[in-house]
Image (cartoon, helix red, strand yellow):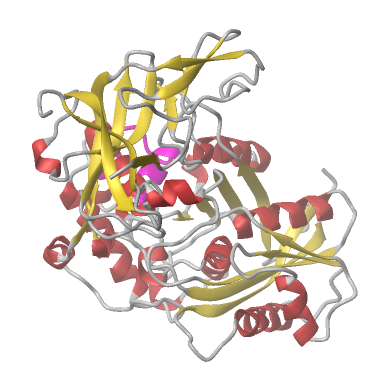
C-alpha cells in the first residue's frame, strides 16, 4: 500500500524536519520562515536528530476528535539534543513500560487508510532498540 | 486612577445540560438576574465572552431582552473569555469612557472531548488534538517536579465535590471518595475520568459601575482584571505548540497574569481570603496554587493535604465546587467564578460561606494561551 504523510514538510522516512534560526541560533519544529522564539526572518531548514530522550508520556485511550486510527496509542514529549522538546506519538501505549530519560528513536507510525487507498503515516518515537 | 470599579450586580444560569434551552436562553437568564440585582441600570456597553456561540451571540441575548443600541462586543479568549470581557469593561470604566458596563458569558459545549477549530485537520488525524493528553503531560511533570501523587489528584476531586454539594448552580452535587475517583477509568494516565471536568452549558453575568475612590460602603469592588497570553518556548504551555525549548525558566501565562493583577490591586497572595482557580483537571488546580504564587513551588500537594484550601482552611480554593463540580461552559467559566466570589464577599454563600472573606481571586487559563486573574475586594 502506498504511504502518504499526514502533513507535508514535517518529516522524512528517517527524521523530523525542523528549523534553525540564524539570529538566535535556536532550533524549532516544525520548520518556519520566521523564528518562533525571536521573530527573526532568517531560518534554515534542518534535519533534526533521530534519537532523543523521553521527557513526558501518557496514553490516549479514547479516539480524540477527527482521529480515525487505533486506540490506545502512546503520546508524549521527546527531548532532542538540539535543545528542543517535541510533542509526538509514541509507539508504546503502555505507560508502565516507559521511564524518564529513556532513549528513544524516530519511527513512522501508521494512522489510517485514506479514501484513495493510501496508508497515512505520521512521525513517532519508539524506545531505542525496540525496532 | 481616579475611579474605582464596583460590581453592582451578578447573575447566573446554573451550569449543566439543558436540552430544551438555546445558548441565548441561558444568556438571557443570567443577564436579567444581573441587571435586576444592580437595580436595572442603563448600561453604555456590553462585552460578551463566548467561544462556541457564533456570530453576534451577545446581540441575540440583548435583542431578546430589548436592550440593544449600545455597543455589544463578543470576546473570545478560550477558557478565559469571561475574564477578557471583564478586563475590557473595567478598563473602559477606569478610563472614563463608560460609567456602567454589562459583562456576560455563555456557552453550550459540544459533548465529549472538546473539538476545537484551534487544531489543524492533520493534527486531529495524527491523534495530536487529544486535549486530555496535554493535561496528562502537565500532570505528570507536576508529579515529578512538585512531589504531587495520584492520591493528591484524587483528594482535589474529593474536596471540590464536597464543596459543590452546597452549590445549587453546580452540575454534580454528590460527594465522592478517593477510592471511587481512582476506580474511574483512566482517560490519559495519570488522569482518571473523574479527575477531569465535564464541558457543559451555562451562563453568568456581571454589571460593573464606576464608583468614587475610597467611598466606604458594603460594595464589592473590582481591584484587578488582568489577562495575559503565553511567552514562546514552553512545550506544555496552554498554547499547545508542537515543540518548545529545553528551558524550564519560561514563566507560564498564569504567573504573568497573577503578577499583573497583584500589581494592579497593590496586594499579594498573602492578602487573599478565598480563591476560585482553574481545575479543568485535578492536577491543574494544584499547578494553579503554584503558578499563582499562593504557595511555594513544590508545596501544592502538602497544602492540599493540610487542608489549607478546604472551606475552613486558611485559603479555601474553589468553594463553589470548581469546574470539577460545576462543569465547564468556556465563555461563562470566569464570570461564574466572579459570581461565586461576589456572593462570598457579600456573605451570602450559605453553607459554603468562607467566614470573613474580604479579598478574593478568580483564575482561568486555557487555549490561546489565555490566562485571566481577577481580584475583588469588599
Q: Where is residue B166, by image quadrant?
A: bottom left
Q: Name the spot of residue A15 as percent of width and height, x first.
A: 34, 22
Tell whether B8 sits left or right of A11. right
In the image, farthest residue toward the bottom: B20
Q: Where is residue A78, by image quadrant?
A: top left
Is residue B87 or residue B240 the one in the foreground? Answer: B240
Q: Name the spot of residue B214 as percent of width and height, x first.
A: 77, 52
Residue B261: tell me if it is visible: yes
Is residue B135 or residue B160 the one in the foreground? Answer: B135
Q: Where is residue B164, by image quadrant?
A: bottom left
Which residue is found at the position 16% from the left and 51% from the top? Answer: B151
Which residue is found at the position 42% from the left and 72% from the top? Answer: B111
Tell whether B144 sits left or right of A33. left
Q: Which segment did they paint magenta?
A: B284-302
Which residue is found at the position 88% from the left and 60% from the top? Answer: B98
Query: Looking at the figure, which quarter contains the C terminus of chain B?
Result: bottom right
Magenta span contains residue B351:
no
Q: Name the spot of residue B16 as percent of width and height, x first.
A: 44, 79
Query: Looking at the figure, which quarter contains the N terminus of chain B?
Result: top right
- Vertical comparison of B108 with B372: above or below: below
Magenta span contains residue B285:
yes
Tell whether B248 sits left or right of B376. left
Is residue B81 or residue B186 the one in the foreground? Answer: B186
Tell whether B120 sits left or right of A97. right
Amino acid at each position: 500500500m502506498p504511504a502518504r504523510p499526514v502533513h507535508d514538510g514535517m518529516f522524512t522516512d528517517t527524521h523530523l524536519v525542523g528549523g534553525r534560526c540564524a539570529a538566535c541560533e535556536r532550533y524549532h519544529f516544525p520548520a518556519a520562515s520566521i523564528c518562533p522564539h525571536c521573530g527573526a526572518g532568517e531560518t534554515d531548514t534542518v534535519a533534526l536528530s533521530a534519537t532523543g530522550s523521553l521527557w513526558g508520556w501518557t496514553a490516549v485511550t479514547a479516539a480524540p476528535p477527527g482521529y480515525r486510527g487505533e486506540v490506545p496509542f502512546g503520546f508524549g514529549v521527546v527531548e532532542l539534543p538540539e535543545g528542543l522538546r517535541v510533542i509526538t506519538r509514541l509507539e508504546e501505549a503502555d505507560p508502565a513500560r516507559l521511564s524518564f530519560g529513556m532513549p528513544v528513536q524516530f519511527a513512522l507510525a501508521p494512522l489510517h487508510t485514506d479514501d484513495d487507498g493510501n496508508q497515512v503515516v505520521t512521525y513517532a518515537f519508539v524506545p531505542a532498540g525496540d525496532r | 486612577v481616579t475611579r474605582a470599579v464596583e460590581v453592582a450586580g451578578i447573575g447566573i444560569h446554573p451550569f449543566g445540560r439543558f436540552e430544551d434551552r438555546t445558548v441565548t436562553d441561558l444568556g438571557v437568564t443570567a443577564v436579567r438576574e444581573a441587571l435586576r440585582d444592580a437595580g436595572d441600570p442603563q448600561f453604555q456597553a456590553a462585552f460578551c465572552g463566548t467561544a462556541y456561540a457564533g456570530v453576534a451571540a451577545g446581540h441575540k441575548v440583548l435583542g431578546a431582552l430589548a436592550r440593544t443600541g449600545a455597543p455589544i462586543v463578543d470576546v473570545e479568549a478560550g477558557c478565559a473569555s469571561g475574564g477578557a470581557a471583564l478586563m475590557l469593561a473595567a478598563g473602559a470604566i477606569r478610563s472614563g469612557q463608560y460609567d456602567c458596563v454589562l459583562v456576560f458569558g455563555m456557552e453550550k459545549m459540544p459533548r465529549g472531548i472538546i473539538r476545537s477549530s484551534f487544531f489543524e485537520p492533520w493534527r486531529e488525524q495524527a491523534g495530536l488534538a487529544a486535549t486530555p493528553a496535554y493535561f496528562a503531560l502537565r500532570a505528570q511533570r507536576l508529579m515529578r517536579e512538585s512531589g504531587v501523587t495520584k492520591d493528591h489528584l484524587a483528594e482535589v476531586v474529593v474536596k471540590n465535590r464536597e464543596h459543590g454539594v452546597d452549590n445549587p448552580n453546580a452540575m454534580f452535587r454528590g460527594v465522592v471518595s478517593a477510592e471511587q475517583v481512582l476506580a474511574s477509568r483512566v482517560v490519559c494516565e495519570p488522569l482518571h475520568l473523574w479527575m477531569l471536568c465535564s464541558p457543559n452549558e451555562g451562563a453568568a453575568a456581571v454589571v460593573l459601575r464606576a464608583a468614587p475612590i475610597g467611598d466606604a460602603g458594603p460594595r464589592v469592588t473590582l481591584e484587578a482584571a488582568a489577562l495575559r497570553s503565553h511567552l514562546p518556548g514552553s512545550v506544555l504551555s496552554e498554547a499547545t505548540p508542537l515543540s518548545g525549548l529545553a528551558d524550564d525558566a519560561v514563566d507560564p501565562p498564569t504567573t504573568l497574569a497573577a503578577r499583573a493583577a497583584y500589581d494592579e490591586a497593590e496586594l499579594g497572595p498573602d492578602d487573599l481570603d478565598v480563591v476560585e482557580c482553574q481545575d479543568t483537571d485535578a492536577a491543574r488546580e494544584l499547578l494553579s496554587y503554584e503558578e499563582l504564587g499562593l504557595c511555594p513551588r513544590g508545596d501544592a500537594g502538602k497544602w492540599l493535604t493540610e487542608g489549607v484550601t478546604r472551606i475552613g482552611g486558611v485559603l479555601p480554593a474553589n468553594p463553589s465546587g470548581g469546574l470539577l463540580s460545576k462543569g465547564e461552559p468556556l465563555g461563562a467559566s470566569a464570570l461564574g467564578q466572579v459570581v461565586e466570589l461576589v456572593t462570598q464577599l457579600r456573605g451570602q454563600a450559605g453553607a459554603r460561606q468562607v467566614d470573613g472573606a474580604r479579598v478574593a481571586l478568580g483564575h482561568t487559563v486555557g487555549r490561546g494561551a489565555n490566562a485571566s486573574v481577577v481580584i475583588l475586594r469588599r
